[in-house]
Image (tube, rainbow, N blue to C red):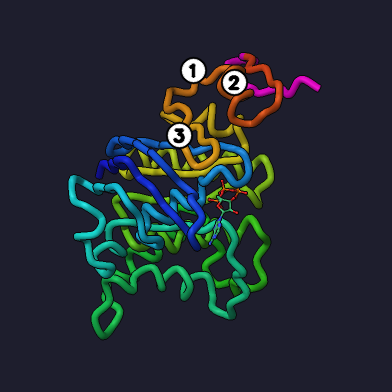
Amino acid sequence: MKVEVKSLKVDLDEVLILEGVNLKVKEGEFFGIVGKNGSGKTTLLRTLAKFYPKEGSIYIDGRELEDIKLDELARIVGVVPQEFELNVNFTVEQFVALGRIPYIRIFESEKDREVVNRVIDSLKCPKNRIVRTLSGGEKQKVLIAKALAQEPKVLLLDEPTSHLDIKHQIEIVKILKSLAKRGLTIIATFHDLNLALNFCDRIAIMKDGRVLKVCKPDEVDSDVLREAFEVEVEVVNLNGWKVVIPKV
Ligand SMILES: Nc1ncnc2c1ncn2[C@@H]1O[C@H](COP(=O)(O)OP(=O)(O)OP(=O)(O)O)[C@@H](O)[C@H]1O
């Protein structure tokens, strides 16, 4: 499903956090959001998930967010939050099954079990382990699995690779890329510019609650990064990889 944001403004506790945000994310697009700390990335994602009141409009598949009730929204939009104290005593299987709540009537159905097992297998999560005992990276995958068990059409992820080593970072972004290729619309924030530049289809660069530029990774240059991050950097091409190097 496509996601469109028009003239979005968000105030939290009477502080202006987002203003004049306009975005058009296509169905099946892997869309990255980057920007320095406090630029408004998390607030934008949470607003897309209807966590915060807003001015302006957000359309999901052409429908204004206000008109989509929360139970229906839970079947359309999956959210993977940034920080999550995942100290629950559930097994991975039980925890991922929570993602089926928007579908469950009284008893878990055969389909619920099938979806939970498919998602766990596709992310290679350790099904029978207790979630509390998992490493940060394993917990991150379990959170993504729970969101995918919702069978969302749009997946919002806040820093999906923040707890991961380089192997697992690449594993997760490749999984996200393949999900997007199969039609899932993915909007994810990244601190790691190199991951965003090499895997996202397009990127929004944010500063001070506004979107400075939306472009393809090839169009991200040192000028816009200097403006957004207030640091001198160079964007170079190294063996087919775009790499952002700080000039210190
Ligand atoms: N409830 C609130 N009341 C006032 N200010 C808030 C509130 N929530 C967030 N902010 C402020 O809004 C700004 C944007 O925060 P947000 O978490 O969206 O940024 P971010 O780009 O995700 O940052 P980070 O990269 O550090 O996670 C920050 O200055 C933050 O302090």
The answer to whether the residue labelled 1 contacts the one labelled 2, judged by CB atoms less than 8 Å apart, is yes
State the image coordinates of residue 5 (x, y, percent, origin top left): 31, 42
User: Residue, x 32% and y 45% (percent of image)?
Assistant: 184
Q: State yes or no: discs 1 and 3 in contact (Cβ < 8 Å).
A: no
In the picture of the structure, the residue carrying the numbered disc 2 is 242
Q: Earlier in the sequence, mark 1 or mark 3?
A: 3
On residue 211, the disc is 3
Label 1 sits on what residue type? Asp
Quadrant of the image for the C terminus? Answer: top right
Amino acid at circle 2:
Lys
| In this view, 85 is above or below 207 | below
Residue 244 in magenta? yes
Q: Which residue is mark 1?
A: 218
Magenta region: 237-248
Q: Earlier in the sequence, mark 1 or mark 2?
A: 1
What is the crowding at mark 2: few (fewer than 14 residues within 10 Å), some, or many (at least 20)? some
Q: Nearer the viewer, residue 240 or 242?
A: 242
